Amino acid sequence: MLDAGAKSPKLGQRIALALGGGSARGLAHVPMLEVFDELGVRPSVIAGTSMGAICGAAYAAGLTGAEMREQLTALFANRAYFVRRFAGKLRGGFSALWSARMPGVVDPVTLFEMLLPEAMRCDFAALKIPFLAIAADFYGIEQVVLDKGPLIPALAASSALPSLARPVVLGGRTLIDGGFVNPVPYDVVLDRADVTVAVDVTGMPRRRPGGKLPRTLDAVTGSTQILFHSLTRAKLKVAAPQILIRPGVGAFGAMDYFKVKAILAAAQPAKEDLKRKLSQVLAKIG
Amino acid sequence: MVIEPGMDTPGKRVEPKKPLPATRPTIALALGGGGARGLAHIPMLEVFDELGLKPKVIAGTSIGAVFGAAYASGLSAKLIRAHAEEALSQRFDIARQLLSARSEPVVKFLNFLPLRSALLKPEALLEFMLPSSVARDFAELKIPLKIIATDYYGQEQTILSEGLLRTAVAASMALPALFTPVTINGRMLMDGGLTNPLPFDILGGEADVTVAIDVSGAPVMPGKRPHPSAFAMLMASSQIMQRTIVRQKLMVAQPDIYIDVEVDAYYVLDFHRFKDIMAAAAPAKEQLRRQLERVLSTETLDTLPSATVSQPVAPPPSHGLPRTRRLPSLNRD
């Protein structure tokens, strides 16, 4: 639980935190959240996209960075444990998760209800830190900022990557992964804080040895990552956060959840970097 | 045939009644990416021919690079249209079937060949999309052309403006999963739409007036199905991203004329529906004609003596919002 001694944000030193999408690479958000715990600062608002929304919501629900590190390391320690735990929770049977109409595509709401901790089964209003989840309105081709109602469907919508997860219909809108409109959602909180910290965990295409052409599926994933980068680059030209952290996890794949330890280790230098920068900012505005 | 202002018949220059004003504006033209929706670029190019205008420079991404290359080679828009119609309707049945399959069988086919890098060589599609009279090298072009491709490992745009033209166009349209990437100078290049779907920004300062043609479209709600298929979702998702990139770019800088062609109902691989796409582009064609005529009529006035004195120019809005004058509506209802 959040340290009771953590300073509440005062006017003039409100710090907003934006956590980007990146699937397994987003595990690198955890060390960044630990920085806030270690410095005893509480973000005044958190925005998250996809995996950034899940980590941000967990933190806003009261989990500490250290608790998240412990739980995630245990959950993804090995495949056998994960499958055991996963199967144990699958009360409605597999049919709850997959439908015959869209085979191979999971229902993200069911999945998240099974996997996410009890503390996150609540409404936005019950969160300890104001929190926003970013999703993309598929037909409206625009960003949707989710900030009320039940938390889990919003997180599911924010993470509903087409072809892997079914879109989530909320308020009559068909919502998909927020990364398609806002991979690093710092801009939605820029004017709600004095200092904005953004964490970008977008990956990059991996080279194959021997200069071989990428495999088809890798090329599709890689080109989507390029689109994410292009989008963030275009956004940075409009407005930039005060602190932008890019943990060195770009080479990990979207599904590398079982490399949780390696991802957390790779994010360690970025954690030190954020800690130094945030301390400097706090010394200046404190 | 190149149509130049003041030229009625090739080779015979007709003396204009009045000398052209010194301030006649030059035009930089940006043609965006969007797969088959980009067939709508052809009617836009027809406007230039019909008004007797010749862009000073053209930038193209993906399908915009295809038609940009043809036009910059000196072909008339009419000829480009005739060739596209013939190529897509009769001559190449196999290619047509492949393209008209709305890609799902193609992707099913791909799934059985997961180790293959891709299906089609983009040069092969180009050979039937482009008339043989299209230049082979950038150096032969009548209008300077800048082609946008994406450096896959560098994750940024590359502007191609010299060397082999068809190779550059092939790189610009190498949509991942459907086409093999193209290697130029050791760099693996793919679809320019991944980094710059509407390349008006690279034309800044090149001409008096910048015109951008956006054919990126928007996903359309299918009839009664609540969700499109997984593959349609993936294609549409990258479309959403490209549109979002364009929207962000428009917040930083805006072209003088922005045409958002209403071709939402067509998919990236709907090349066989070229007639419908051309018809859907008719209102956009009229819009472009009106806007170009307006620009020409207001900016071709004789220079007043006082106007040569440098006037302080209002700085661009610092808040970064698009000008209200020609605010493009990307979010249609």
Image: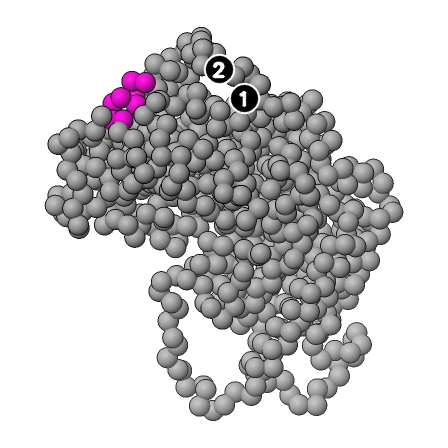
Mark 1 vs mark 2, CA separation in Å: 9 Å
Magenta region, residue range: A63-71
Q: x%, y% of residue A40?
A: 16, 33
Q: Residue shown at 45%/86% (left/top)? A: B308
Bin the neighbour count of mark 2 within 10 Å (Cα to Cα): few under 14, some 14-19, many 20 and up: some
Give coordinates of residue A276: x percent, y percent. Answer: 19, 36
Q: Main secondary structure of the magenta part?
A: helix
Q: Amino acid at mark 2?
A: Leu
Q: Secondary structure at mark 1?
A: loop
Residue identified by numbered label 1: A97
Q: Is residue B280 magenta?
A: no
- Residue shown at the point (58%, 61%) measured from the top left: B212
Residue A67 highlighted magenta (yes or no) = yes
Q: Note whether A199 is above or below B56 in the view shown.
A: above
The quadrant in which residue B200 appears is bottom right
The residue identified by callout 2 is A90
Among numbered discs 1 and 2, the one appearing first in the sequence: 2
- Between residue B24 and residue B102, name the one nearer to us: B102
As displayed, is residue A270 above or below residue B300?
above
Q: Quadrant of the C terminus of chain A?
A: top left
Q: On the picture, is A181 further left or further right than B211?
A: left
Q: Amino acid at mark 1?
A: Leu
Residue A224 rendering spot, x and y as whole percentages: 53, 37
Pinpoint the chain carrying mark 2: A
